[in-house]
Image (cartoon, helix red, strand yellow):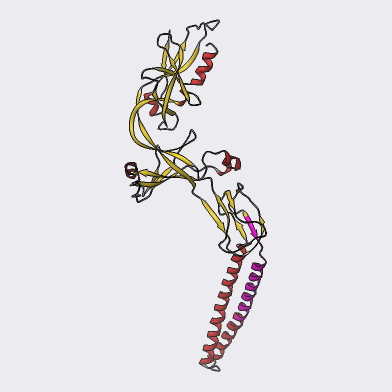
Amino acid sequence: MLMMQHLKSISPVALSLITLLFTSTSPLSIAAEPKTAELPTLITQIQTMPSYVELDARLEAINQSTISAQTSGIVEAVNVDINDRVEAGQILIRINDSQQQAQLSQARANVAQAQALNEDAQILLKRNRSLFAKKTLSQGELDSAIARAKSSQAAVVATQAAAKQAQEQLSYTLIKAPYAGIVSQRMVQVGELVNPGQALMTGFSPQALRAITDIPMHLAKQLSKQLSKHLGTAKADNLFILNQGQRFAAESITLFPFADNRFSSVRARINLPKMELAKIDSATINNSTLLPGSWVKVAIPSREREGIYVPLTAVLQQGEVAKLFIKDAKSQQFKLRYVRLGQKLNSADNTIDLVEVSSGLESNEEIALHAIEAAKLISSGL
């Protein structure tokens, strides 16, 4: 005798999936004694879900740049290499600073000299004002003293600016990382002479990635309605990045304000959520499926369609073969059935991963909610 019990709904999408708990007391021939096992099940129904269009997209790092030299000199040290992780402000390359140190010393000496001449000119001006008040100095001599004082004061400002520039040139001998990231290319060796504008090193930040794709006009019009209130950028609802069987939710999307008349498409930038840099290292980058420059798929919702959707936990996947445990209405036993899967999606609150069963399954059939648990219980004779 079967006792069926409804499972509590997990999400708005799962409200339409009638989940049941049952207890089976019918003995199996392979069991020595009758045993009881509880398997959560669900009754399949036809659902109305959004249909997705998959487009090719190329990943790129939002922060990716090539560092160039801003001063000339001999490279003394290269502290990092390709695939090394660096922190913001970390010294990457050190250039010999003998020439820059000499220029800075000269600039500071010029500042000291200008300040001394300015002090003398200011004292002389003060004395001449006193003499002019006593009518022992002519107006012409006073005007000359004022001009010399202003000139010496301007010379101090000029030499200070030159000293600041020399200090800046000295700081250019230490090439620092503009942000935390990964070194992807190195174009200089120790002992080489570099000049301003010469490329030294390339890097990127794996924290923030985005996918670049061209969206057909009919899909772009649907997205533009959502973006009209957000000045071209909006939260990406039900938008996913697909790669090697994995699905990543997008964070936001930006549509370009012009179309490509050759392909009748609009370019879009789809941003992925930022990763915590503390969890990113060279091993993470090497094993990640999301790498800048790689090609992925972008799933964009187009319209709604009817189909049978089940949780991914109910699918027993073995390579390209997918199977479900279907409960036979007469024998009340579970049997494996081969099915063909369609698109994958998730529930509204991102708590359940769903997959469409395009063939091999009908509505109002009872399936095991957790395929692995069902396989274990059936193989153990429960």
Left or right, 278 with respect to 329, comes to: right
Span shown in magenta: 92-117
* Quarter-of-image position of residue 16: top left
What residue is shown at x 51% (from left), y 21% (from top)?
Answer: 372
User: Is 104 a magenta residue?
Assistant: yes
Q: Nearer the viewer, residue 259 or 176?
A: 259
* Quarter-of-image position of residue 105: bottom right
Image x and y of residue 206, in percent: 53, 45
Q: Which of 84 and 351 is in front in this view?
A: 84
Left or right, 206 with respect to 192, comes to: left
Image x and y of residue 216, in percent: 35, 43
Left or right, 136 with respect to 45, comes to: right
Q: How many labels does the image show?
A: 0
* Main secondary-structure element of the magenta-colored stretch: helix
The answer to whether residue 354 is above or below residue 20 is: below
The answer to whether residue 313 is above or below residue 22 is: below
Left or right, 6 with respect to 196, comes to: left
Image x and y of residue 260, in percent: 35, 49
What residue is shown at x 62% (from left), y 62% (from top)?
Answer: 173
